[in-house]
Image (spheres, rainbow, N blue to C red):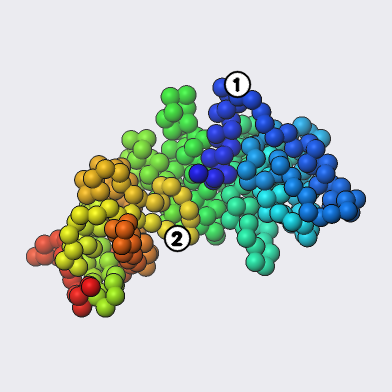
Amino acid sequence: MDDRPLRLLVDALARESYGGVRYGDPSADIAQLEALLDGDLASKRVFFSSLSRYARPFPLSDDLRERAEALTPRVWEAKISNKGNVEWGLLMHLAFTASPRSLPLFLRAMEFTKPRDQLGAARRGWAVAGIAFITHRRKDAHARKALLSLLDHARPDVVAAVVDAVAALGRSKDERLTQDAVKLLERAAASAGSFEARCLARVALLYDRREFPTEPSDEVYRVSFSFGRASRTIELLAEATLTELCAEVVSSLHWDLDHCWALRLSDRVDHPLLHVCPEGDPWAATDPLSALTLREVGFPVGHEVELLYDFGDKNRFILRVVGREGRNPRAKYPRVAESKGEAT
């Protein structure tokens, strides 16, 4: 299940546009939550069916929205059961309501943190989704300014969420990217502060058949990894695909290319487009993601990628980009530059 906040909102909006039935009116739960936080309930173990990650987004009336906005910071400080679910539900309904009056709360939620915070990433995801929905549905200038400012945020997951929002919501009636969305994605593809945001922007532009900035085509990528007592450093041209990267890793160990593989391009941001797992023949490079070239993905030096080869044996490799340098005209690529030990 894809439980990214933005995806949940987009799916809920699609259901509404097709006349779907609304489920999960949170009015009763909001009243009960107020009573709980005010100390008017004997037990603190209360189940809120509409305030959880399993509920559907619901548009709030002005009164319910104001009460939900007031309750959210109180939940942050409260000692109640299932508070993560409750906070998720409040932010979800507020984001779907997309009121410009909720903007200050989303900006506050973006920066709120606490020790051992298990909902930090999800909270930031809902904050970005809420700001993006206000921008998209209400055409609010303040929300748009706030959203664009987040492209320079220090957290990779925040910048990636902004790029994801622009790619998902910046669409015309024919489902092509709008010119405004293209400009923002081109900016992110070229200069976003995190690899994840740059990669997501490039994939969005690629899927829309747009040109996008890439790294130089004459570079050579040096990639190192180890497996047991064996270690290798391989070199590939910037035009090599992700499929060819995996093939060179496996071949450098003298293994056969007869199993499936998957790449996780980042361990900092969880997004379906950062997981490459081709269907059908895993070595055919017919999947759009597996056919991406190294220069299109734009791995920076020091970046690490996880490769899973053979889903039965679960052979795992951490591939580290240790260098990007000019091509040696005398060399034949791809090649094994350094080799120690044998894989068993």
Q: Residue at x 67, y 46 (%)?
A: 52
Q: Residue furthest left?
A: 330
Left or right of residue 18, residue 224 in this image = left
In the structure shown, which secondary structural element does the residue marked by tag 2 occupy? loop
Q: Is residue 301 visible?
A: no
Left or right of residue 103, residue 149 in this image = left
Residue 242, compared with residue 3, is above or below; it is: below
Residue 98, compared with residue 243, is above or below; it is: above
On-image quarter of the C terminus: bottom left
- Viewer-proximal residue among 117 and 186: 117
Q: Residue at x 78, y 41 (%)?
A: 29
In primary-sequence order, the first of circles 2 and 1 is 1
In the structure shown, which secondary structural element does the residue marked by tag 1 occupy? loop
Percent of width and height locating residue 112: 68, 58
Q: Residue furthest top?
A: 19
Percent of width and height locating residue 303: 38, 64
- Viewer-proximal residue among 334 and 19: 19
- Which residue has dot 1 on it? 19
Give residue 267's mark: 2
What whole-number distance in Å separates the C-alpha atoms at marks 2 and 1?
Answer: 39 Å
Residue 57, compared with residue 319, is above or below; it is: above
Left or right of residue 199, residue 45 in this image = right
Q: Residue at x 81, y 35 (%)?
A: 63
* Marks 2 and 1 in Cβ contact (< 8 Å): no
Count of numbered tags = 2
Q: Residue furthest right?
A: 40
Percent of width and height locating residue 93: 68, 39
The local crowd at label 2, few if under 14, some if 14 to 19, many if 20 or more residues have their Cα within 10 Å, is: few
Amino acid type for the residue under numbered disc 1: Gly
Amino acid type for the residue under numbered disc 2: Asp
Q: Residue at x 41, y 47 (%)?
A: 273
